[in-house]
Image: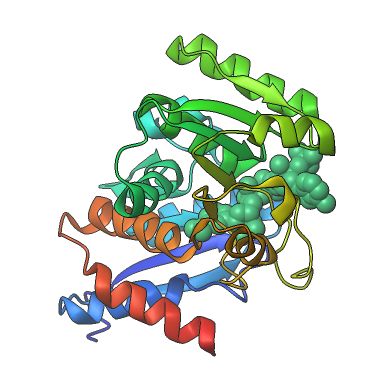
Amino acid sequence: MKSANLKLFALIGDPVEQSLSPPMYNAAFRALGLNCAYVALRVPKQFLTDAIGGIRALNIAGFNITTPHKIGIVGLLDELDESASLVGAVNTVKNDRGKLIGFNTDGEGALRALEEKVGSVREKEVVLLGAGGAARAIAFSLSKAGARLTIANRTVSRAKALASTIEQKLGIEVEVASLNRAELTGALKNIDVLINATSVGMSPNADQTLVSASMMHRGLVVYDIVYEPLRTKLLREARRAGGRTIDGLGMLVHQGALAFEIWTGKRAPIKVMEAAAKRELRG
Ligand SMILES: NC(=O)c1ccc[n+]([C@@H]2O[C@H](COP(=O)([O-])OP(=O)(O)OC[C@H]3O[C@@H](n4cnc5c(N)ncnc54)[C@H](OP(=O)(O)O)[C@@H]3O)[C@@H](O)[C@H]2O)c1
């Protein structure tokens, strides 16, 4: 790594200490022989504006943005790509000769990871748990890809707001449900795919799940975007019910690969990135 013409990339969020992104991107840069490095920077909410000024001053080539800044960053950028303006949130920024352009690769990353395992989601009945940042991006991507979507969230008003934004922006109707056990069990009957995009089941609360085996049917595809741990309680319940499971690693790698391609213009070494993330998860 030559420091004179090194291109620097970063993750901005709070917290960032546990992030898998630095090993994943640094492995990709090494694999392609690029003189680039990626660092995680903890930026509390009150310093976001200063941090973006710093990015411009230091000419950082690109960055990822994570909790709690994915929405707050929007007004600090010069331009939004369609992926970000549709969702109203950004997870990737490219510094294009001083112009900061925001993208959102979460939805497309999640869709690629899902379709890689089950094929096209067109006309598939999908229940999406969650209406937070990740769920928002996934809901738009699934709707655009032709899935028939129901959004179920603890705060039902957030699910309703997301459904009506999708209807307004894409002209596609989306159903809404609560997490009430009877209502959710009804919504899950005969569906093709269940996606968890809430933080339920994430370490240190790894013994929690919003859906148990008795609410699932044989053959159901159950996709949990939580990746810490990879084998969540939800996925274990799905196995008990005779379902097919997809863990959160694929989304992590694909959203990262899309960001890598936006920054470098080069095809991302997906296998290298996946191996680096897996190594880090196994610790
Ligand atoms: N695999 C990947 O690449 C990837 C990428 C992004 C995120 N993720 C994971 O996805 C998860 C969500 O991330 P996010 O950024 O979307 O978070 P977020 O914006 O904070 O949204 C959190 C969501 O979880 C729901 N929730 C939280 N606690 C709950 C509980 N006890 N019971 C029911 N619902 C609950 C919230 O419901 P309310 O609206 O009612 O609060 C909301 O829908 C995290 O675990 C994150 O690590 C994975």
At x 37%, y 25%, the residue is 146
Q: Position of residue 161 (x, y in %)?
A: 68, 20
Quadrant of the frame with the C terminus:
bottom right
The answer to whether residue 34 is visible is yes
- Compared with residue 188, is residue 82 higher up or lower down, i.e. above or below? above
Query: Of residues 213 and 97, which is closer to you in this image?
Result: 213
The answer to whether residue 72 is visible is no
Q: Position of residue 41 (x, y in %)?
A: 56, 69
Q: Is residue 80 left or right of residue 133?
A: left
At x 21%, y 69%, the residue is 269
- Compared with residue 63, is residue 149 higher up or lower down, i.e. above or below? above
**Which quadrant would residue 163 be assigned to in this image?**
top right
- Compared with residue 276, is residue 72 higher up or lower down, i.e. above or below? above
**Which quadrant would residue 233 be assigned to in this image?**
bottom right
**Which quadrant would residue 150 be assigned to in this image?**
top right
At x 39%, y 46%, the residue is 105
